[in-house]
C-alpha cells in the first residue's frame, strides 16, 4: 500500500483489519475465511473495509506487508540502539534471520495459507512479503540497482524465496515442528557472506547500509 497521509481513525481501522486477518488465520485455513468475517472481527463496517481492500486476498496481502515492515523496522531500531551501526555482513545476516524468525513467530498463520483447494493464499503472501525486495536491496547497498547488476537482485530474491519455500514445506508436513535453529542460523550466515561479497564488488557501494523497509 502506497504511503499516504491518513487520519488516526483510518490508521486504527487498518490496524484492526490487519489484526483480524492474523487472528482468523490463526484459527483456520484462509480459504475458509470470508471478507465479512474479517471486517466484523475488526469491528469496522463493510464500506470501510472495501474502501481500502479489494477483497479478502488484498486484505491478506496488506496485512502481511504491514506486519513484516513494522516488525522489521522495530527490530532494526532495537539492534541499532545497542550496536549503533551494522557492518555489511551483519546487516545481511540480521535481515535474513529476521525473515526466518518472522516465520517462526507466525508459524500457525503460515501453516494455514496453503489448503487442499490451492496455494493462492500462500502465493499472495509471498508476493506481498517480497514485493519491496528491489528497494530493500538498494537500501542495503546504499544505491539504486542499475541494469547490468540486475542479476544481483535475482540472486537475493532467489535466496529469500528458497527460505520461504523451505519453511512452508516444513510447516505443511508438521506445523508443530520448528526448523532447527542452528541450521537456520548457519544458512543465514553463509548467504549473508555471499551477499556481502557481491555487494562490495559494486562500485561506490556504501559500507554502512540503511534499513528503511522489509523485503
Image (spheres, rainbow, N blue to C red):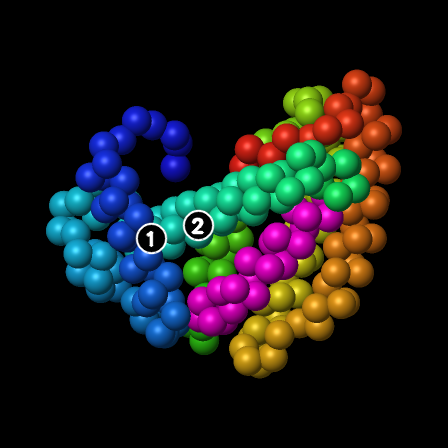
SS for dot 2? helix
Q: Nearer the viewer, residue 114 or 63?
A: 63
Task: Please check the rendered image and state whether residue 111 is part of the magenta-colored stretch, yes or no.
Answer: yes
Residue 21 x/y as whole percent:
33, 59
The image position of residue 67, as x and y in percent, is 44, 50
- Per the image, is 14 magenta? no
Picture residue at 86% right of the left edge, 37% below the top: 197
Screen quadrant of the N terminus: top left
Q: Residue at x 62, y 71 (%)?
A: 169
Residue 173 picture quarter: bottom right
Q: Which residue is mark 1?
A: 18
* Residue 153 shown left or right of residue 177 in the figure: right
Stretch in magenta: 92-112
Give above or below for 206 relative to 15. above
* In this view, 44 is above or below 212: below
- Mark 2 crowdedness (10 Å alpha carbons): few <14, some 14-19, many ≥20: some
**Structural distance between the alpha carbons of marks 1 and 2:** 8 Å
| Mark identifier at residue 67 | 2
Q: Position of residue 176 (x, y in %)?
A: 55, 80
Q: Which is more N-terminal, label 2 or label 1?
A: 1
Q: Where does residue 78 sit, x and y in percent of width and height?
A: 57, 44
Disc 1 vs disc 2: Cβ atoms closer than 8 Å? yes
Is residue 137 something one can see in this rendering? no
Secondary structure beneath dot 1 equals helix
Amino acid at each position: 500500500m502506497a504511503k499516504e497521509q491518513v487520519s488516526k481513525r483510518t490508521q486504527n481501522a487498518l490496524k484492526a483489519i490487519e489484526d483480524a486477518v492474523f487472528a482468523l488465520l490463526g484459527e483456520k485455513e484462509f480459504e475458509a475465511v470470508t471478507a465479512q468475517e474479517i471486517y466484523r472481527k475488526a469491528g469496522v463496517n463493510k464500506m470501510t473495509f472495501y474502501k481500502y481492500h479489494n477483497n479478502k486476498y488484498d486484505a491478506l496481502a496488506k496485512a502481511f506487508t504491514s506486519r513484516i515492515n513494522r516488525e522489521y523496522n522495530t527490530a532494526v531500531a532495537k539492534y541499532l540502539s545497542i550496536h549503533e551501526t551494522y557492518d555489511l555482513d551483519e546487516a545481511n545476516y540480521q535481515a535474513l534471520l529476521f525473515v526466518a524468525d518472522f516465520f517462526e513467530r507466525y508459524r500457525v498463520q503460515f501453516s494455514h495459507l496453503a489448503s487442499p483447494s490451492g496455494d493462492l493464499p500462500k502465493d499472495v503472501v509471498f508476493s506481498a512479503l517480497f514485493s519491496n525486495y528491489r528497494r530493500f536491496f538498494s537500501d542495503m547497498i546504499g544505491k539504486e540497482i542499475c541494469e547490468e547488476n540486475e542479476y544481483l537482485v535475482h540472486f537475493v530474491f532467489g535466496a529469500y524465496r528458497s527460505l520461504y519455500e523451505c519453511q512452508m514445506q516444513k510447516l505443511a508436513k508438521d506445523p508443530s515442528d520448528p526448523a532447527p535453529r542452528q541450521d537456520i542460523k548457519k544458512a543465514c550466515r553463509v548467504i549473508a557472506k555471499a551477499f556481502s561479497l557481491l555487494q562490495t564488488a559494486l562500485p561506490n557501494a556504501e559500507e554502512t547500509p540503511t534499513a528503511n523497509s522489509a523485503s
